[in-house]
Amino acid sequence: MSFNISEELKRTFDLASLKHLASKNLNANERKDYSKITTKYAGLRQFEQRAHEMEYDTRVEVARKRIINKAGAKNKDFKHRWFGNDQFDKSATIRQAHRNVRAQHGQLMAGIDKMEARDITKFLDTCEKRNQLRDKPKHDFENATDRRARDGLPQDRRQPRPR
C-alpha cells in the first residue's frame, strides 16, 4: 500500500501521451471508437469516485474493524501481562483506517488508468497496422519509381559518374 511517486508519474505520463497520440493520428471512424473507449473509462471513474464519496464512512468503519480484529488476534509470542501495556489507541486506529481507505481508492483509480492505457494501446496498434496496410501501395510505388542508384552513385541521375 505504499505510494510510489515515480510509478504514479510514469502511469500518468503514459496515459497522457497515448491520448495525445490518439488525438493526432486518427480518422473519423477511429475517433468514434476511441471516444467510446474514453467515455467508458470516464464513466467508470465517475462511478467509482461517487461510490467512494458516498460509502466513505462505511468503508472507514469496515477498515477500522479489520484493524481491530487483526490487533486482537491471538499472538504466539508470550509476553507476561506485567511486562507490557495495552497499545490500543482509538485515534491512531481511526487514522490508519482513513489512510487504508484512501490508499485502496487510489489503487482502484490507478487500476482503471492502467486498463484504459492498455485498451488505448491495443486500439492504436490496430490503427497503426491499418494505416501501414493502406499506405503500403504508395510506398511500394515510390520505391519502384525511384531510379537513383543506391550503391555509391550520385543521388541525382543527371550528374556524371565520378571517375
Image: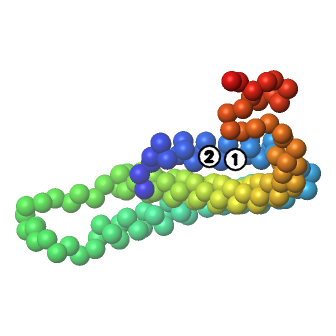
> In the structure shown, which secondary structural element does the residue marked by tag 1 occupy?
helix
- Write the residue at 76% across / 30% down: 155
The answer to whether 41 is drawn above or below residue 26 in the figure is below
The answer to whether 146 is drawn above or below residue 133 in the figure is above
Label 2, label 1: how far apart the Cα atoms are: 6 Å
- Write the residue at 54% across / 44% down: 10
Q: Nearer the viewer, residue 120 or 89?
A: 120
Label 2: how many residues lie within 10 Å, few (<14), some (14-19) or many (20+)? some
- Write the residue at 74% across / 41% down: 20
When asked about the image quadrant of residue 97, the answer is bottom left
- Asked whether residue 52 is in view, the answer is no
- Asked whether residue 70 is in view, the answer is yes
The quadrant of the picture occupied by the N terminus is bottom left
The type of residue carrying mark 2 is: Asp
Q: Are the residues at dot 2 and dot 1 in contact (C-beta closer than 8 Å)?
A: yes
The numbered disc on residue 18 is 1
The type of residue carrying mark 1 is: Leu
When asked about the image quadrant of residue 146, the answer is top right
Residue 22: x percent and y percent?
77, 47
Q: Which residue is mark 2?
A: 14
> In the structure shown, which secondary structural element does the residue marked by tag 2 occupy?
helix
